[in-house]
Image: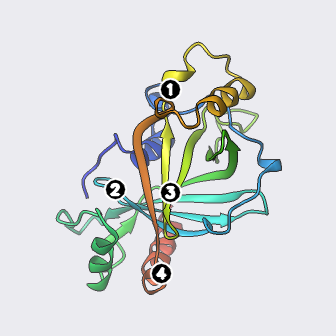
Amino acid sequence: MKPNTRSASGAILMLVIIPVIVGLLACMPVPIGDPERSRIDPNITGIWVVIDEGDDAFFVFEPYDKRTWLATFVPIEEGNEADLGDFELESYSDLAEFVGKEPVVGSNGVTAGKISNFKAWRTKLGGEWFMTLEPKMVIDNESFSPEVWWVFRIDRPDENTVDLIMLGDDLFRDVDKTRRAYERIIKKNAKNEDLYSDEVMRMVRVKSEHLDFFESLVSEAIDTN
């Protein structure tokens, strides 16, 4: 369980913890799409483990209404009295093997880190589906509005896998910071690889036999956060 802040999942976590680095990361100064006109995809609703070479975590996509999700990002960390340095979540089989050992959930085993909450919705532009993540619990201004949003292209390699491909910033330089201006660029370049960064967050749906483990981690997150 070693940190890797260059990953997409690490970037999401660092946005919430260290807002000062926002300018160094691929994020949007405006939201993409209108959540009031969106519709959730029920095939994305659920619990997804993030398959990453450094940032062990999972996402819970809970429908808030017919249009948006409440998306909760939960890092998986070592407890204060544990040493899980040999565990690396590089495939779902790694997770299955780890959970099969019935790991302790708590300070002497595996625990949940600082959770991050987002409002999430989909938008279709240029024939591609995109997901916008809007950070919540933003209380440093009177409008309760974030300064940045995360935007990803949604790819579905199979029914149990979602790849969230982070947009880059190369094509947005010198563009007016308005939603319409940004959406025009995305629509025009949706199939242009130059629109995207190299960061892909792969999420794999948690199987029913492993749900108890994640439910325990959610309870741990609620108790410790």
Rate crowding at label 2 as few (under 14), some (14 to 19) or many (20 or more) other CA atoms within 10 Å: many
Q: Is residue 69 above or below residue 187?
A: below
Quarter occupied by residue 93:
bottom left
| Residue 191 in view of the camera | yes
| Residue 109 in view of the camera | no
Residue 19 drawn at (x, y percent): 50, 33
Gap between marks 1 and 2, in whole Å? 22 Å
Rate crowding at label 4 as few (under 14), some (14 to 19) or many (20 or more) other CA atoms within 10 Å: few
* Amino acid found under the numbered disc labelled 2: Asp
Q: Which mark is residue 115?
A: 3
Give the mark, 3 or 4, whose residue is nearer the N terminus.
3
Residue 212 drawn at (x, y percent): 46, 84
Residue 215 drawn at (x, y percent): 50, 78
Give the mark, 1 or 2, whose residue is nearer the N terminus.
2
Q: Residue at the far right: name it.
A: 36
Gap between marks 2 and 4, in whole Å? 19 Å
Closest to the observer, 21 or 33: 33
Colour scheme: rainbow
Q: Residue at the far left: name it.
A: 86
Q: Which mark is residue 52?
A: 2
Give the mark, 1 or 4, whose residue is nearer the N terminus.
1
Give the mark, 1 or 3, whose residue is nearer the N terminus.
3
- Disc 4 marks which residue? 211
Rate crowding at label 1 as few (under 14), some (14 to 19) or many (20 or more) other CA atoms within 10 Å: some
